[in-house]
Amino acid sequence: MKILYFLTNYPFYSETFISAEIEQLREAGHVPIICNFTFATSAQLNSRHKIINNTRSLVTLGSAIVKNIQANQSLFLDRKFWIAVISSCYKNPRFIFKYAFMLLSADYMLVQARKENADLVVNHFLFKSTLAGSFIAQKMGVPNHIRLHTKRYLYSDTVLKKILKEASKLSAIAVDVKRFYEEKVEHSRSIDVIRQSVDIAFLSNMHHPKAEKALFTICAIGRLTKKKGFDQLISAVSKLDLNTKKKVQLRIYGEGSEKQYLSELIEKYKLHDHITLEGKKPHKELMVSLSNSSVLVVPSIELRDDIDGIPTVIIEAMLMKVPVVAYDTASISEIVIPSETGFLVPSNDVEALTQKLEQLIVDNSDLATVKENAYQKVLKEYASTLANDI
């Protein structure tokens, strides 16, 4: 089966689990083709998949519009497409220029996508590429499967309901996300739960018994943005008892707009000996670092217009039997069950996070208790994939 995968800024914004999902589809004998609504980058050079990138050439974009007008298939002249785009711009004015370019480039992507004679369209997220991808799927008469990650979308409610109603299939990566969108679509529409894909065999094989260490190593992974809550994690470490703090090494992996601020916090609290910003690492190298850590801490917070679902790194840690400490936010409590498969702390509660870390550092007997439970839970709930479903 040929599958068109509509994404934005591939592979930069394509989360680890999307890459794993695409690989699983390939291993199952399907042919995934990436429709990337941004432009070719050097990061794509080693990709095993065919990638259809957007183009900056206005002549090429104009030619595609003319070609589709002649075939009576143009999205540029599609009234419903314009209404969807304009209402989305009204809701999120900061994206107006990106949406304007999408209007110009949608016909080009339609022309390129049509050449593939695909059997299925898969749209991830509910952002710009999903909007265009949904209309392109309709124009091609190809089934459209929308994958729902979080309770965040960039459309007006009217556009959201239309996009979800017209999708051939809807699936969510979490029960919490499923319930959220079920309230926004017709009750007759079913939303399946298909968890995000992870390489279970690879990660399970990376687990190995950890020798006793002098240091308690904390790992934190994610883009350095406000919603990841790394500033609160740094504050929590700063509040640890002095003797406890001497045993701690926190390593934060990732890049992003908050990097300078986080560096200033480390300077402010004089934590250079205890906290390092490690930057972005290749995934396999990152997993090695995670597997050697005492715990993974996920201090994600809920912002008004941005929220995580279930961060994939939690699942990866559990498969490598690395205990997880997380804020109780988004859908995380579905997988991190307090004192059973991990440890939950009230969201935005730095004091509670400090107390939990202090407790685990001083007496880490509880860590051993949750490892096997978490591992077994992930094996059970994440064995079913999009490739299996197809």
Image (cartoon, rainbow, N blue to C red):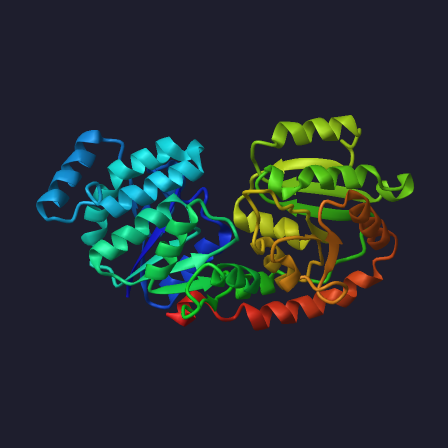
Rendering coords of residue 386 (x, y %): 42, 66
Q: Quadrant of the N terminus?
A: bottom left
Q: Nearer the viewer, residue 77 or 257?
A: 77
Instruction: Locate the C terminus by quadrant.
Output: bottom left
Q: Residue at x 56, y 70 (%)?
A: 381
Measured along the vertical axis of the image, is residue 308 above or below residue 142? Answer: above
Q: Residue at x 46, y 48 (%)?
A: 153
Q: Is residue 272 above or below residue 230?
A: above
Residue 325 pos. (x, y %): 72, 54
Q: Residue at x 70, y 26 (%)?
A: 264
Give the vertical position of 385 relative to 242 (above or below). below
Describe residue 265's horizontal placement relative to residue 6 as left or right. right
> In x, y percent, where is residue 297?
70, 50
Counting labels gives: 0
Residue 294 visible to the viewer: no
Q: Quadrant of residue 365?
A: bottom right
Q: Is residue 20 visible?
A: yes
- In front of the other: 76 or 381: 76
Q: Nearer the viewer, residue 155 or 17?
A: 155
Q: In the image, what residue occupies the spot 66% across and 28% down?
A: 261
Residue 211, percent from left and from top = 77, 57
Height in image: 161 above or below 11?
A: below
